[in-house]
Image: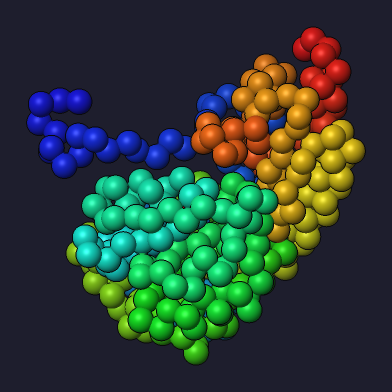
Amino acid sequence: MSRFLSAKYADLIPYVPGEQPRDTQYVKLNTNESPFPPSPKVQLAVEREAKRLNLYCDPECTELKAAAAKLYGVRPEQVLPVNGSDEILYFSFLAFGDEGRLFAFPDISYGFYPVYAAFCRIPKREIPLSPDLSVDYRDYLDLDATILLANPNAPTGTCLPVAQIERIVCANPNRLVMIDEAYIDFGGESCVPLIERYGNLLVFQTFSKSRSLAGARLGFGIGSEALIRDLNTVKYSMNPYNVNRMTQAAGVAAIEDDAYYRANARMIIQTREQTARRLRDLGFTVLPSKANFLFAGSDRIGGEAFYRELKARGVLVRHFTKERIQDFCRITIGTNEQMEILLTHTEAILNGKGC
Ligand SMILES: *Cc1c(COP(=O)(O)O)cnc(C)c1O
């Protein structure tokens, strides 16, 4: 660090994104992207919009907001488009946290939560997952804290039913409950319909995973008009043009081609279930997943060794060094062909064969 770095950041440990190799030699199953390209209509819309890059984009994202509101069954005033759902997380920590108002989230969840807490200087309380690595909703009924849950959770993939989320929201009428639904399109049930009834519920979604737009950076906050207004106060104090022109166009076109993404999500779900069965047949423990990834570990090989052996064979998965989950790897669901490659190498690794 330079001698000019603010003292308040001296101890900050930034988030470490999954590897993004510049070459394409890897079967990339490490950052939960979609293996499918964006719909051709999205590509066309982006090309068209590129001709207008000399002009600032619409800070209100009027067209995109209207399309998203229709998709989610809410009013445009209940939606905030953002530069990836990481941004809505950041806005939320800024808007709704302070030193006296701590954030509670599971000890094993999205790695960005503790980073934002530290960055925004908001105290955190990490609630341990159950021994089976699932979230127990009963742990969130009596907390004096803002609650933040990924549902499905990451990197585990387990999902709570809407009724249990509703219990949490009801039990905390004077506390904000934030539900990060990054993976909700892969078989979970969204709690967006609850926002009409509960002013203390804020839902995040992203187009990075199920809608093949990770590189475009597009996410949404969905909540009461009052919550969205608060978030807009932060946005307009920071970066009014947070969703660029091409991404707004891509988002509108993606929503118009909803059937394309639903079909892709169905394929991912099918491939996920097949892959889970095959890994279990090989002796792996595989958590039940409603996401586009599997969290799997085996007694026959450590998580880190499995990650390394796969990488040596050209397959990238994600390993986390946290003690409770170090025996596992998170494997993104790709195409059937990609999963065949993963399984073939996995078998070879378990049988002790060389590359
Ligand atoms: C991927 C992910 C995000 C971030 O998504 P972006 O929209 O790409 O910023 C947020 N939350 C969880 C749980 C994720 O896995």
> Quarter-wise, where is residue 55 in the image?
bottom left
Q: Position of residue 123 (x, y in %)?
A: 29, 55
Residue situated in front as seen by the camera: 215 or 49? 215
Instruction: Name the side, left or right, on which 250 lies relative to 157.
Output: left
Q: Position of residue 282 (x, y in %)?
A: 87, 33
Instruction: Name the side, left or right, on which 141 lies relative to 289.
Output: left
From the viewer's perspective, is residue 319 above or below residue 41? above
From the viewer's perspective, is residue 294 above or below residue 24? below
Residue situated in front as seen by the camera: 4 or 167? 167
Quarter of the rendering occupied by the N terminus: top left
Quarter of the rendering occupied by the C terminus: top right
Q: Residue at x 54, y 34 (%)?
A: 323
Q: Residue at x 47, y 80 (%)?
A: 171
From the viewer's perspective, is residue 6 above or below residue 129? above
Q: Residue at x 27, y 48 (%)?
A: 119
- Outermost residue on the right side: it is 281
- Outermost residue on the top side: it is 354
